[in-house]
Amino acid sequence: MDPRRNRFLAALKGTPHDRPPVWLMRQAGRYLPGYRELRKAHSFWDVCHSPELATQAALEPLARFKLDAAITFSDILIVLNALGLDVTFGPGEGPRIGHPLRTSSDLASWNTRNVMERLAFMPKAVAHLAKTLDGSHGLLGFAGAPFTLFCYAVEGGGSDDFRKARVLLHQEPELAKKALDTLADIVLELTLAQAEAGADAVQLFDTWGGLLSREEYETFCVPALQRIFDALQKKGVPSLLFARGGMHLLPILGHTHASGFSLDWRMDFAETRKLYPNHVLQGNLDPLFLLAGEGVVRDETKKLLSAMKSFPSEKNIVNLGHGIVPETPPEAVAAMCDEVAASAR
């Protein structure tokens, strides 16, 4: 087995390996010249829907940087689009939801019939990427967590606080729970399909989970996440949960039954490792460090590696605490990956 994929799989299992593997959230994207050229010729949705184009986007960072894993190129909102909510992206704008969820009749209009037929392009992209990689790197699939998808569905687009979604949780708790369960079932089908297509692990992005209190997260999010992670565990699929802004949620994240957690850059790695000695922990360099110069990148990467080495666990993966921002110099990403590669024992 290629040492890059071997490292990634070993970290998921907790078996000995020479150094922590590294991959980065949004490692394929607008900061890379090849992706910008790709987008000149194809729309974002075109890239997502074409296995060949999605693979092209996913491969560029692997060719440039010392990465150990690839992640399929797609978007979390494909689930809402498949349900008929009419997701669009305007030039320079965030997503817009043409048919937001506000009432029980809105939920009843969701097109859940044969939904995986409309999402088949994503596992096909995973299969195409897996075949192209031919075992050279670890491979991740992903999906949006139910609550984050719920936020966009209710709000009708992006927001800083998603107040409409958060209010609906309490005004119409039964409607909210039914919507979250529906989303959980689809996310489970989608992640299982990706695993069957060749993904070694899957990550759920709960980008807006940190907006909720601990009690709210336990009430509304944990049951939906358990539906997903319990089923993945039964199939032997490793799972990671990224809860952005979820520092206050750390004591209950274990209730979700995820195999591990991708840490927000504000979460202390050592404190989290003490809390979860047997989970996979991934992260969590502040992505803005990549804008601060090569010296800062190398120093902060060494600090993260040192924190990982302070504990006996082999279940560590180096990553950022959120996605790469578009202004990031590729040289900074190279410096981070080089420091991780140099840490091999």
Image: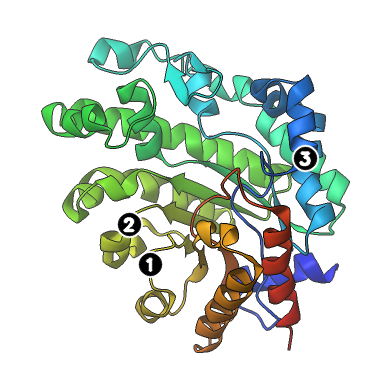
Q: Amino acid at mark 2?
A: Gly
Q: Residue at x 25, y 61 (%)?
A: 248
Looking at marks 3 and 1 on the same chain, the residue that comes earlier in the sequence is marked by 3
Left or right placement of residue 175 versus residue 224 in this view: left
Asked if residue 127 shows in the view, the reply is no
Along the line of sight, which residue is nearer the eye, 264 or 296? 296
Q: Which of labels 3 and 2 is toward the front?
A: 3
Residue 219 image point, x, y percent: 21, 47
Q: Amino acid at mark 3?
A: Pro
Considering the numbered disc 2 on the image, is that residue within a helix, a strand or a loop? loop
Looking at marks 2 and 1 on the same chain, the residue that comes earlier in the sequence is marked by 2
Considering the numbered disc 3 on the image, is that residue within a helix, a strand or a loop? helix
Left or right placement of residue 55 versus residue 193 in this view: right
Q: Amino acid at mark 1?
A: Met
Q: How is the image coloured?
A: rainbow
Q: Would you identify the image quadrant in which residue 96 lies?
A: top left
Considering the numbered disc 1 on the image, is that residue within a helix, a strand or a loop? loop
Please say if the residues under marks 2 and 1 sit with CB atoms less than 8 Å apart: yes
Residue 67 image point, x, y percent: 74, 62
* Cα gap from disc 3 to disc 1, whole angstroms: 32 Å
Residue linked to disc 1: 267
Residue 334 image point, x, y percent: 74, 63
Along the line of sight, which residue is nearer the eye, 343 or 108? 343
Please say if the residues under marks 3 and 2 sit with CB atoms less than 8 Å apart: no
Left or right placement of residue 288 versus residue 198 in this view: left
Residues packed near mark 1 inside 10 Å, few (<14), some (14 to 19) or many (20 plus): many
Q: Assign the N terminus to one quadrant of the image.
A: bottom right
Looking at marks 3 and 2 on the same chain, the residue that comes earlier in the sequence is marked by 3
Residue linked to disc 2: 246
Q: Assign the C terminus to one quadrant of the image.
A: bottom right
